Image: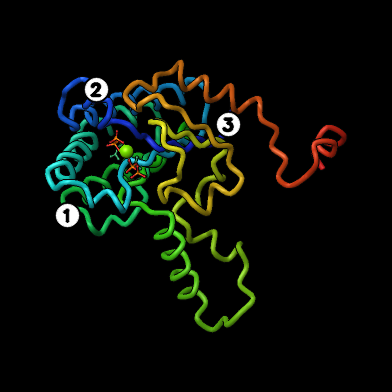
Amino acid sequence: MPRHVAVIMDGNGRWAKKRFLPRVTGHVKGVELVREMVRACLERGIQYLTLFAFSSENWRRPQDEVSLLMQLFVKALEQEVDKLDRNAVRLRIIGDLSRFEPRLQELIRQAEARTADNTRLDLTIAANYGGRWDIMQATNHMLAAQPEKRDGWQESDLEPHLSMNFAPEPDLFIRTGGEERISNFLLWQLAYTEFYFTPILWPDFDTAEFDKAITSFQQRERRFGRTSEQLTESPNA
Ligand code: IPE
Ligand code: IPE
Ligand code: MG
């Protein structure tokens, strides 16, 4: 099993359009699939699930779609946190939260505090998140933490300041909806992640589709720069 799965949940709009429904219906259905995905991770013992819900570029969408997405976010926080907590899920939201309404920011703070001691599954929602933003905010924090240091910076100096500093890097990245791009999701952390792209639209991405992604992952050989022979001769070297 992968330890950490990261997902770009794409295709809600097209799912709705195919049915002559408003785009927001696709987003509503998409929230249901998040529930199913969390359940599937709990059942499979996957420790970290990270979902891209809203990118820093998604503000460019029509204003009514953006505000409906925000309402859905508020509603999900109001209605789902109890159940997450009962299932020992720890919820975190990563991204530049300063742009959200105060009420949403407060709900996020409460939900994170309430689930902070849970250890069964780490569920992270990326909202107003961008991979470049993450690297820049981490860089700024890194420099501010050691103002006297002039050079010799290492990757390990930056990593504690990245938004996902609490998690191992994703093992499996899934993007639904047919596009084959990262769209400014976790740039630093995906360096050695296995990618899985599927044309299935997010509202149709059920447990059976998730298992296909996991099976594909399990057939890969992760070499991290080594040769295949090295791995078979001494797998732990
Ligand atoms: C993904 O679905 C959800 C968000 C970006 C919020 P889309 O809304 O991007 O769906 P498509 O790509 O238009 O089908
Ligand atoms: C990426 O989806 C972000 C989320 C799923 C939240 P988009 O649908 O916004 O990405 P692009 O614009 O097609 O790259
Ligand atoms: Mg899309």
Distance from disc 3 to disc 1, alpha carbons, whole Å, reads: 36 Å
Residue 153's label in the rendered image is none
Answer whether residue 158 is visible to the viewer in this image. yes
Q: Which residue is mark 2?
A: 18
Q: Secondary structure at mark 2?
A: helix
Distance from disc 2 to disc 1, alpha carbons, whole Å, reads: 36 Å
Of badges 2 and 1, nearer the viewer stands 2
Q: Position of residue 159 (x, y in %)?
A: 54, 59
Q: Which residue is mark 1?
A: 102
Residue 2's label in the rendered image is 3
Relative to 146, is 63 on the left or the right? left
Answer whether residue 31 is visible to the viewer in this image. no
Q: Colour scheme in the image?
A: rainbow
Write the residue at 55% across / 24% down: 214
Q: Which residue is the extreme one toward the right?
A: 233
Identify the mark nearer the N-term, 2 or 1.
2
Write the residue at 50% across / 81% down: 147
Write the residue at 47% across / 31% down: 120
Q: Which residue is the extreme one toward the left?
A: 64
Distance from disc 2 to disc 3, alpha carbons, whole Å, reads: 33 Å
Q: Is residue 109 above or below residue 9?
A: below
Q: Is residue 210 above or below residue 167?
A: above
Which class describes the residues within 10 Å of circle 1: few (<14), some (14-19), or many (20+)? few
Write the residue at 52% across / 59% down: 160
| Quadrant for the C terminus in the image | top right
- Give the residue type that dot 2 points to: Lys
- Give the residue type that dot 1 points to: Pro
Q: Is residue 56 above or below residue 192?
A: below
